[in-house]
Each structure stands twice: as C-alpha cells, then as structure tokens.
Amino acid sequence: MTPMNWTCEHIEERLSDYLDGLLSPDERHAFDMHANTCENCSQMVASISHLVSDLHSIEQIETPPRLVYAILNQTLGPRAAKTGWQASFGWLRGLASARFAYYGVSVAATLLILLMASGISLRKPKLADLAPGNVYRNIDGQAHRAYAHTAKFVSDLRVVYEIQSRLNKDNELPTAPESTVPQSSPGKNPGSTDGSKPATPRQQNRANGIGRELEILATEVPVVSGQLCGRLLGRRIP
Amino acid sequence: MAPCNFWGKLVTVAGYEADDTLEQDAQLVQHCLQGDGSAWEELVRRHTRRIFNICYRFTGNGTEAEDLSQDVFLRVYKTLGSYRSAHGGFATWMTSVTRNLLIDHYRRTKRDRITDSLEDAMPVVENKESAGRRPDQQLLLGELSSQVQTALTKLSPELREAVILRDLQQLDYNEIRQALDVPEGTVKSRINRGRIELARILQQMGVRPS
C-alpha cells in the first residue's frame, strides 16, 4: 500500500491502529496524507479520537459495599463467629490504626492543657487539687494572671511604638547643622539671611521633652524599653 | 500476605507495577489452592471492582452486574485449580471467565430483551434514554458516562465487549486476544468497528465529543 493509493476505506479500516500507535512510519505518513486532504476522513478521525479520549477519562464505578461480602459468603460460606478470648478482645484490632493514635494524642494534649490551666501540679499531684472549689480558684487565678501579663505586654508594646513614631517624626523634621547656625548677616546688612533654617526653640523643646520621656520610660519599663532607650540615647540608663 | 501488599504499594515505578501485580496474584492463587481462605478474600477484594465494572458496562444494569459478578467469582473459585499462570495473568483469565458468563447471560436474556424492545415501542410516558436506570444511578455515573452506557447497550455484544475491554478497562490487544480467545486481527477489527459504531450512535443521540 503506497502513500498514493490509500482510500477512505483504508482510513476507516486502520483508524484504531492509527490511534493506538500501531502503524509503521510509512503507513502513518500515508494515513496522514489522505486524512489531511479528505474532509470526511478528517472529521471521522477527530470524532473517534475524541471518543477514545472521553472513554479513557470515564472513571470506574464504585463497587456496592455488600458485593464483596456476598461473594465471600457464597464461596467461603458465612463467616464463623469468633468465640472465647478472640471475641472478647476482637475490638482491640480496631485500635491499631493511625487514625486512632492521632485521636489519642489529641485527647491527651487537650487534657494536659486543661490540667495546666486548672493549676494542678503534675510533679506533686494532690487529691485536694481536684476539689471543685480549688479547681475554680486555680483557674480564676490563672486567668487573671494571664490577663495581667497580656495587658502589661500590650502596654509595653504601645509605649515602644509611640517612642519609635515620635523619633521618626523628629528625624523627618529638617535639622540645622552647626555650620548653618545663623551667622552675622551676610554683607553686614541688617535683616538679611543666608537662606538656612536654624533650629527653632520649639524643636529644641520637643527634643528635650522626648529625652525626659525616655528616661521616665526606662525607669517604668526597665526590661523592654531600657535597652531601647539606652541605645537611642547612647548611654546606659540605670 | 501482608508483606506482599506492603511491597506492592511501595513499587510505583512505571512498568514494574503490572509485573508486581501479576506475581502477587500468582502467589495468592497458590495460597488459595493450599486452602488459605484469607488469600481468596484478598483476591476477591483486588478484582471485584474490575469485574463489577465489566459486568455493569456490558449489561447496563446494577443488579444484574452484581449477580453476574457473584457468578464469576463462584465459577473462578470452583475452577481455580485449572488456572495455569503460564497461559497468562490471573486477571486476564478472570476476564475470560467473565466474558463467557456475560455472553451466556446475553443469550439467555435475548428473548426478554426482544419483549422489552416491543414494549418500548409502545407509547409510554418515560424518557427512553433513562429507561431501566434510577436517577441516583445516573448521578453516580455522570452525564458522559451515562450517555456512553446507553450507547454501549445498543452495540452488538462482540463489539461491545471489545470496546469495554480496550477503552474502559484499557487492556492491551494481547490481553483482549487471550480473554476473548480470538485472533489478534479479529480483536483489532472489532475494536475499530466498535468505536466507529459507538461514535455513530452517540452522534444520533445528539452527544458531541468533548
């Protein structure tokens, strides 16, 4: 069969071989030669190609769950009921699964958190810790302490943030280097300046105020802001 | 048997999985023949879905497919001693048993279908396309799958089984040849004619390929 003499019948006859890649290179060439020039064959190739693609994309149907048991019952007979110790401990088989281990760890972690929150000492557990009144007091105390710690931490953060924002504002203000401190009027003309902007009294007051605030902050919040203020002021603050 | 499964899941390199499955099946059959019930149970679990799908695609009816699947496994269980691994894989052998039962079932129910088709010709208030299939089944299959299923039942049994094994079960030509016990040329011809015929039926149903 030469490339020149393939007909529509040949194309139809060898269509699946073409789609399944079973044609030799020469045959494939002949197939393409005809299919590219014949509109009917071209449409047929496209149609069957899409159909095969669709068929391959269809997923397998799920088996009815009872089918396996029905087959096993028919072939092996009804499952013999387990007796004795096997029946008693049969439920343990279900525990040997990853899912059960995950649940177990989750429950243990939750219990541990609850015990810690209720203030029960795990090192020296006492029966009195489990009394409802003691549990309530412990939880109440823990909650208040946690709230106080949180409030203090937020307050510290707010102070530090305020200082940082004030310093940033201060840095953004135009500063006057010493070389631009107003000199005598150029040309000895009273009232005329050299165009530079000297530090105003207001800026000086502001800088002094920030310095004082930092020192007060360092005494109030010695741990967090002491280091920051010391770094900012360039000296160690007691 | 458990180590067998474990290593089977670990081997995922393309090309080796099929050989691995064949080997596992052969080992399970050997254990079954030695009276190991758990080996048989494992074989049933491994092949039930595939056999049920072939039966469902051929008959287009879930209940019939379940009954036929049970018949297939019952026959396989009784004739397991006649299986020879040298003649092909266990799955191919099972497919061959399934195919023989399906053809028997087709011939047995031919008279019923003729009666049914006469009744179908009578004017009834029912969508012809969805006849014999419950709405939940149609949802399960999906639209395309449902349309293909309807079209498949209109093919002759020879073409239908060839298309099901090749394009839905994706067996190779050699496996189909062994399962159907016909020459390879006949397999190719049936697959080709089956595809063309199926496309024509779908076109008549107004289904456009995606």
Image (cartoon, coloured by chain):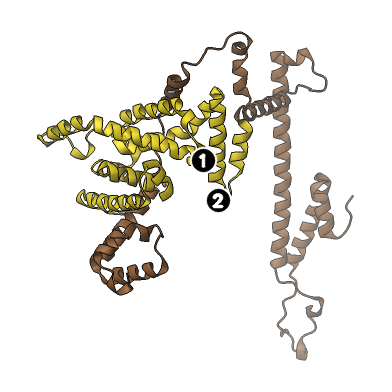
Chain colours: A brown, B yellow
Chain of the residue under the numbered disc 2 shown in the image: B
- Residue A155 in picture, x, y percent from top left: 71, 44
**Residue type pointed to by label 1:** Ala
Q: Which mark is residue A153?
A: none
Chain of the residue under the numbered disc 1 shown in the image: B
Q: Is residue A186 left or right of residue B108?
A: right
- Residue B151 in picture, x, y percent from top left: 25, 44
Query: Is residue A58 shown to the viewer in this render?
Result: no
Q: Which mark is residue B86?
A: 1
Distance CA(mark 1)–CA(mark 2) = 23 Å
The residue located at (77%, 85%) in the rendering is A185
The image quadrant that residue A188 belongs to is bottom right
Q: Is residue A157 above or below residue A21?
A: above
Discs 1, 2 touching: Cβ within 8 Å: no
Q: Is residue A23 above or below residue B106?
A: below
The image quadrant that residue B99 belongs to is top left
Q: Is residue B206 left or right of residue B160?
A: left
Residue bearing mark 2: B14
Q: Is residue A137 above or below residue B183?
A: above
**Residue type pointed to by label 2:** Ala
- Residue A50 in picture, x, y percent from top left: 33, 56
- Residue A65 in picture, x, y percent from top left: 43, 27
SS assignment at label 1: helix
The residue located at (73%, 51%) in the rendering is A160
Out of A138 and A48, give the one closest to the viewer.
A48
The residue located at (34%, 26%) in the rendering is B67
